[in-house]
Amino acid sequence: MYADIIVDISQEQLDKTFQYRIPPELENEVQIGVMVQIPFGRGNRLLTGYVIGIGSTPKIPAEKIKDIDSVSQSGIQAVGRMIQLAAWLKKQYGSTMNQALKTVLPVKEKVRQKEKKTVRLAVSKEKAAEYLALYEKKNAVARVRLLKALCKTDENGLDTAVLKEQYQITTQTIQALEKQNVITVETQELYRNPVRETAPGQERLILNEAQQKAVTQFCTQYDAGERKPWLLYGVTGSGKTLCYIEMIQHVTAQGKQAIVLIPEIALTFQTVQRFYRRFGSQVSVLHSRMSKGERYDQFLRAQRGDISVMIGPRSALFTPFSNIGLIVIDEEHEGAYKSETVPRYHAREVACHIAKEAGASVILGSATPSMESYYAAMNGHIQLITLDSRAGSGGLPAVDIVDLREELRLGNRTIFSNRLRELMSDRLAKHEQIMLFLNKRGVAGFISCRSCGKVMKCPHCDVSLTEHADGRLMCHYCGYTTPKITVCPSCGSRYVSGFRAGTEGVEAQVKKTFPQARVLRMDMDTTRGKDGHEKILSEFANGNADILIGTQMIVKGHDFPNVTLMGVLAADMSLYSSDYRASERTFQLLTQAAGRAGRAEKSGNVVIQTYTPEHFSIVSAANQDYNAFYEQEIAYRKLCGYPPADNLMKIMLSSPDEMLLTKSAAWVKAFVDNNCKYKGLMCIGPADAPIYRIKDVYSKIIYVKHKDREVLNSIHEKLDVNIVGNQAFKNINVQYDING
């Protein structure tokens, strides 16, 4: 018998199978999906590989085929359906099979199982007394202590850890008495449990009329065999999570399993607790901050069918459930669902594929649906369910849009507008909580005038220009460039610069302005530890702080009843990034941020500080009017040929050799132009990447547009045929990203 094996060489674009002979002694162990050790190359160095096929016919002369060395006992087996999924990922997103296999295995290594050992008497207590007398006579003091301890306890025995700690009993003493059949040692496998069981299961909340209607609609169609994806669009605070719980209850009651995806690890604690209160120990969690042992145990529990609901960020999608009935993607609009490493998959698309193959349903939930999901719903590809009002008695918060240009004219140069400072003083006096959101992700990507608010934008693409290290401003969609701008072309002001601010600076200003306030800061620096997110959120939830300062992670799905004020310090910082999605992301962030205030009985206020108060995304977010935003944004996307109206593939080339990179990028552009004659195809570039050089590696980007996704897939395949194995591209890294 022969095995087709994908070799694990991450640094090489090696994407072909190699045939190896299965030795007779390994025939029972080598199966599709197992990890094996194989001799590779002329030097026969041992490498790891994945078995993706088994057959009886050699593809090359049998005498040239090497034997598999061994089956790796430390690797996780990739089951057949995971290999099929990896093959789909490879084709859909442009990666090697090896990269795809590693993606579908969120847990890759076996970890030694945690054990509990219990020691019990193997003889009657009368017989134990005889042995005790014998050991006392022999002055075997350790054996005496052990027998006395066991004679005092009941038939449940004692844990070896207790014996060692409290009675100073060694392993050797236990083994000696076990060998004499005086005692027995029972070993029980334990799962490492990452879920803090703070509340019992079976809590059941009453649905309101809108929630009940949504749940009933889903359950009726699910029972009728309808498996089209669903979009649950509900305003912030409308109770989407409770709907998820009821839908999952319905599905798991039929013996099925469910996966719940959340965009950020920061949301794990609060989400898991809500689900645990209903499903108890049937719930588990899987994410990167867990220990290897914890991740392995949850993988094992899922594989064995010991749990029915798995919660986690993007990678939890690949939980090895055998009977998936429902996949829920909460806050489905979030960019965190898009992988930033190869293969650059989107969890929403992969979930729909997995569900289709498994006969399961998908629920996409959001108060600010992605343009892709809502566009699909409007075109009948997804079923739409709407929750129009908040679940409790509280209404949507009152929103103030503050023009920072006017604040500057009034002489206010602080980060707090007069309106925000006034409301912060009021809430602190009332002992209510405040959240301050800094709409920042890395370094500012746009240049603007501080006097009039004008942003330097591309005259051809309606996206902001990005400042490069040499001062040049560039559009990364058409390649337009202009020299450094020092004087505003609109008002003549010299106050032209990038907007820069950080959470630490905000924290310092808050403490200076409100010295009596208890302040917490939540960003990458304060959440590096294993439970960093959980500790900060718990502190805030328990009322141990008055003000929580943070970036995007604080506005995603959290529910704090005592928060009555949300301050958005710089709404423009995402609005004018060099990305066609900038308006959409700004609207989503501002709407989500506004939704954190006034979620219980107390009314809420939101202050949005901006240099462009008239922008439609800011006005729509302030009004919580998704439809108004969608109509304007989809018109812009259709006009410019951006997703979801068209499909967009980004070809990213990088190399430490700048001249070689320039030559290779020009070749790719010429290849697409000359060999891909599709009607309506547009190829743009090459352009320098937003950050052209990182660690002395240069990057360029080429954009390819077409209405048909399959056309872009075929272009990617054509390029791969000509690039993979081509010596001219040996020092060029090529990656593909579709609709990223």
Image: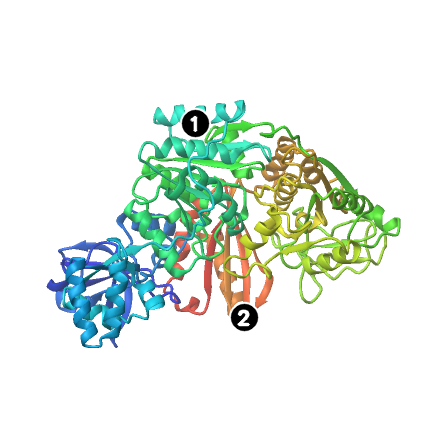
From what the image shows, is residue 229 above or below residue 185? above
Residue for badge 1: 218
From what the image shows, is residue 360 above or below residue 667? above
Q: What element carries label 1?
A: helix
Left of 385 or right of it: where is 395?
right
- Look at the image and tell me whether residue 67 can be seen: no
Asked where in the image residue 70 lies, by quadrant, the reply is bottom left
The residue under label 2 is which amino acid type?
A: Met
Q: Where is residue 724 in the image (x, y as percent from the top left)?
A: 38, 62
- Mark 1 or mark 2: whose residue is earlier in sequence: 1
Q: What element carries label 2?
A: helix
Left of 88 or right of it: where is 427?
right
Asked where in the image residue 593 lies, by quadrant, the reply is top right
Residue that appears at 35% across and 24% down: 224
In the picture as drawn, the residue positioned furthest to the right comes out as: 410
Q: Could you say which is closer to the camera, residue 505 or residue 643?
A: 505
Q: Where is residue 325 in the image (x, y as percent from the top left)?
A: 35, 36
Residue for badge 2: 659
The residue under label 1 is which amino acid type?
A: Phe
Mark 2, Cα crowd under 10 Å, few <14 / some 14-19 / many 20+, is: few
From what the image shows, is residue 89 above or below residue 244? below
Left of 240 or right of it: where is 485?
right
From what the image shows, is residue 576 above or below residue 728? above
Residue that appears at 44% across and 53% down: 287
Q: Position of residue 532 (x, y in %)?
A: 54, 57
Q: Whole-Å distance between the Cαs marked 1 and 2?
A: 57 Å
